[in-house]
């Protein structure tokens, strides 16, 4: 008989009130999680777009910086980016949408615009005069987007 009572107690399960209370607690917790994620997702998307813009600006800056300072063939302003052979050829570049060095539009980045300026700069160095202006250039790469994102990278190259 004692064994019978122990078996009956272990087979009781939950009452309807306990079940409804558990469902209500789970629903409240789930609602809280959904509201937190709805706030966090736009911030995460904005951070991702900023990282994309910075990477894009860095890629353009790397491409430009890898070119020689002086024009190797003596022809200024080659017709297209695939022919650019010195840093000054990039001055005035305006890619909307951004393109690779081969001229192909970069997929997934069509809402960005890349502009480049390259200009001789005043002498610079630790004391301000080690590199003459004719031998130094300032490169500015700006990446902007339709949602008012703007990333600007600067670099200096010398002869």
Image (cartoon, rainbow, N blue to C red):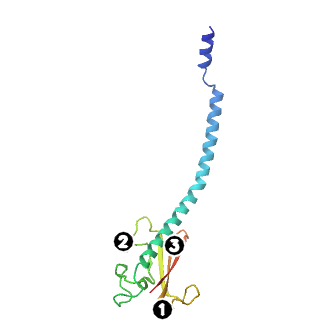
Give above or below for 3 relative to 140. above
Position in image of residue 47 (x %, y %): 55, 62
Mark 1: few/some/many CA within 10 Å (<14, 14-19, 20+): few
- How many angstroms separate mark 3 from mark 1 (CA)? 30 Å
The label number, if any, that marks residue 21 in the structure image: none
* Horizontal side of residue 144 vs 102, given as left or right: right
Is 82 on the left-hand or right-hand side of 50? left
Q: Label 2, on which residue?
A: 104
Q: Quadrant of the N terminus?
A: top right
Determine which residue is flagged by label 1. 134
> What's the CA distance linking mark 2 and mark 3?
19 Å
Badge nearest the viewer, 2 or 1: 1
Side (left or right) of 86 relative to 31? left
Q: Earlier in the sequence, mark 2 or mark 3?
A: 2
Q: Quadrant of the C terminus?
A: bottom left
| In-front residue for pair 93/139 | 139
Q: Residue at x 61, y 35 (%)?
A: 23
* Disc 3 packing (10 Å; few <14; some 14–19; many ≥20): some
Q: Secondary structure at mark 3?
A: strand
């Amino acid at each position: 008989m004692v064994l019978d009572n122990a078996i009956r107690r272990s087979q009781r399960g939950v009452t309807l009130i306990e079940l409804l209370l558990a469902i209500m607690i789970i629903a409240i917790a789930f609602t809280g999680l959904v509201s937190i994620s709805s706030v966090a997702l736009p911030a995460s998307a904005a951070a991702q777009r900023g990282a994309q813009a910075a990477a894009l600006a860095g890629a353009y800056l790397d491409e430009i910086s890898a070119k020689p300072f002086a024009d190797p063939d003596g022809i200024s302003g080659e017709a297209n980016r695939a022919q650019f052979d010195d840093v000054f050829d990039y001055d005035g570049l305006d890619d909307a949408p951004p393109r690779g060095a081969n001229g192909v539009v970069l997929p997934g980045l069509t809402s960005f615009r890349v502009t480049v300026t390259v200009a001789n700069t005043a002498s610079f160095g630790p004391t301000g005069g080690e590199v003459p202006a004719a031998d130094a250039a300032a490169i500015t790469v700006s990446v902007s987007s339709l949602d008012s994102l703007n990333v600007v990278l600067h670099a200096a190259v010398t002869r």
